[in-house]
Amino acid sequence: MPFTGVKLICGVLSPDDRLWEWALHEITSLWGEPERISEVFPFEHTDYYRDISPVLFRRFVSFQKLKYAGDLVFWKKQSCQIEKKSGSKRTVNIDPGYLDGARLVLASTKDHAHRIYLGDQIFAEVTLRFRFGKWVPFDYTFPDFTSDRYYSFLDLVRQDWLKETRGGGVIDREISD
């Protein structure tokens, strides 16, 4: 089966609208215009990112055009650079990944038993799968992804993916091997 491409998607954690707007500007300057931006979700399932702020909000962004899934390492490295630019103490968290008809894959700099090493100190995990018409988490899925709060947005991005792949969408790739 030929490779059809993926939708680049990015989760952004920020404490306020000003830093959200800054992060959005930074990622769009790298990855192009957003296709969709989610509503604002309170981030309250863990205090792991308390070093950023005691109160955080998550938004998702999906980008126009199909992308090459093999660029996930590159996207994560770029997101880490943006986080470093946010201040002497990082003030945003940016998690790129991709979505296709079957899965949501997220990149990480942290290793765990369920993650696959991609190279250049970057790992990937299938965070959710799409099965029998709905998003299904795994036992290791982040707690905020196990609730259905993000699924409506992910459904829309999946529909965008389906529309593009059925329409013979061309993979947009800016870097080369």
Image (cartoon, rainbow, N blue to C red):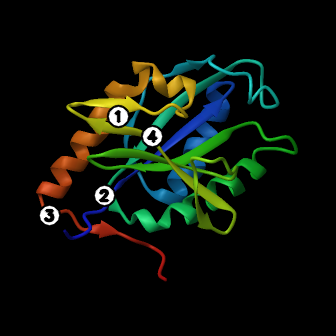
**Quadrant where the N terminus lies?**
bottom left
Give, as a three-letter code, the residue at label 3: Gly
Q: Marks 2 and 3: CB-CB under 8 Å?
A: no
SS assignment at label 2 = loop
Identify residue for label 2.
65
In percent of the image, x 16 and y 49: which residue is there?
Answer: 163
Image quarter of residue 45: top right
User: Which is more N-terminal, label 3 or label 4?
Assistant: 4
Left or right: 9, with 164 as reference point = right
Task: Indicate the position of residue 9 as horizontal and vertical percent values.
Answer: 44, 46
Give, as a three-letter code, the residue at label 1: Leu
**Numbered circles on residues, count:** 4
User: Which is more N-terminal, label 1 or label 2?
Assistant: 2
Task: Indicate the position of residue 101 as horizontal and vertical percent values.
Answer: 26, 47
Image quarter of residue 50: top right
User: Which is more N-terminal, label 4 or label 1?
Assistant: 4
User: Which is more N-terminal, label 1 or label 3?
Assistant: 1
Give, as a three-letter code, the residue at label 2: Lys
Identify residue for label 1.
154
Task: Indicate the position of residue 44 as horizontal and vertical percent values.
Answer: 63, 16
Which label lies toward us, 2 or 3? 3
Q: Is residue 24 above or below residue 116?
A: above
Q: Marks 2 and 1: CB-CB under 8 Å?
A: no
In percent of the image, x 55 and y 59: which residue is there?
Answer: 75
Identify residue for label 4.
61
Task: Indicate the position of residue 16 as horizontal and vertical percent values.
Answer: 66, 24
Q: Which mark is residue 168?
A: 3
Cα–Cα span, label 1 and label 4: 10 Å
The crowding category of the residue bearing disc 1, from other C-alpha atoms within 10 Å (few below 14, some 14 to 19, many at least 20), is many
